Image (spheres, rainbow, N blue to C red):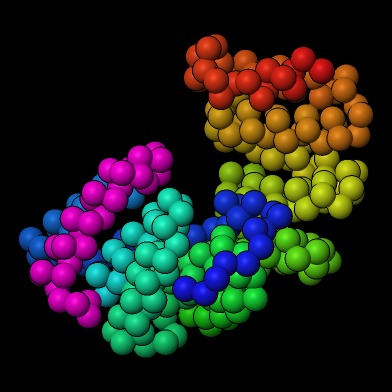
Amino acid sequence: MATAGPSPRVPMTRLAVALLCLALSPALVSAQDSLWEKYMAAGAESYGKGQLAEAEKMWLAARKEAESSFGPDDIRLAATLTNLAELYRRQGKYPQAGWLLRRALGITKKAKGSHHPQVASIVNNLGTLYATTGRMDAAERMFRRALILRERTLGPDSLEVASSLDNLALLYHDEDHFQDAVQLHRRALAIRERALGPSHPGVTVSLTHLASLYTDLGRYAEAEPLYRRILTIRQSALGQDHPDVAAALDALAELYRKQGKFALAEPLYKQSLAIKEKALGAENPGLVPTLNEAAL
């Protein structure tokens, strides 16, 4: 992999990546398929919980099963390598992640052709890897390529297209191409609203990106209704005591703090702190930032 560029200013943890687990027809599932699927699903569950060591263990077992049962050119192996690559990216093992993604891409192109949704997913993940390491030009090429492939193979209103639009917009945000970023986030938001409905928690993905961008631009009056909408959606869909509600309260409070509206920010921080204390315990060190903000 080429030398990394400067660290991005916009957190690249916001970028959407694709974890793969192929859906197999029940009539065609063999004992080997079932074992491979078991390892893949267990790895995805552990990954979702942040248990990266256990996820790696399961996906390495899936890789071994795929190589021994299906062969080195099988699409199931490519899916396994893709997931392992994302795990290694999160762990900062960038050369390993890049090697696995390129191998997965080669396998998938050979098995499915260059115009396939799984090719788009791997290309998207390559873009995320490049963005994480500051290779913004390469990341933009990958994100644009993934967007085109997804539009062609899945349709312009698919949620995968929305993810690609948001990823490209985050890149433009980091590069100060603000108007392009706003337009792409708005397109992504419209797709999510049509596909999921305006009150679905999935809509808050694009809302959060757009509100954050407006905040960075000092367009606070445009950011506030978006943050309030995020809070309302999460409270309704997830319940008043969900950690994502606390995150939404923090974001709205931070917006007010930036404007010097401390009387509005303080009760929101305190409400967020109460949710976190209930979930984590009052002595958890993760509460320190919110405690500090609540003491405005």
**Residue interval drawn in magenta:** 45-74
Q: As displayed, is residue 296 above or below residue 101?
A: above
Judge whether residue 58 is colored magenta.
yes
Left or right side of 113 for 64: left
Q: Is the magenta stretch mostly helix, strand or loop?
A: helix
Q: Nearer the viewer, residue 130 or 232?
A: 130
Residue at the image position 19 percent from the left and 77 percent from the top: 72
- Residue found at the very far front of the displayed protein: 3
Q: As displayed, is residue 46 above or below residue 195?
A: above
Q: Where is the C terminus found, in terms of image quarters?
A: top right
- Percent x, y of residue 96: 37, 64
Q: Nearer the viewer, residue 138 or 274?
A: 138
Residue 18 visible? The answer is no
Left or right side of 47 for 165: right
Q: As displayed, is residue 214 above or below residue 246?
A: below
- Percent x, y of residue 156: 60, 75
- Residue found at the very far left of the displayed protein: 31
Image-quadrant location for residue 147: bottom right
Residue at the image position 63 percent from the left and 67 percent from the top: 5
- Percent x, y of residue 113: 37, 88
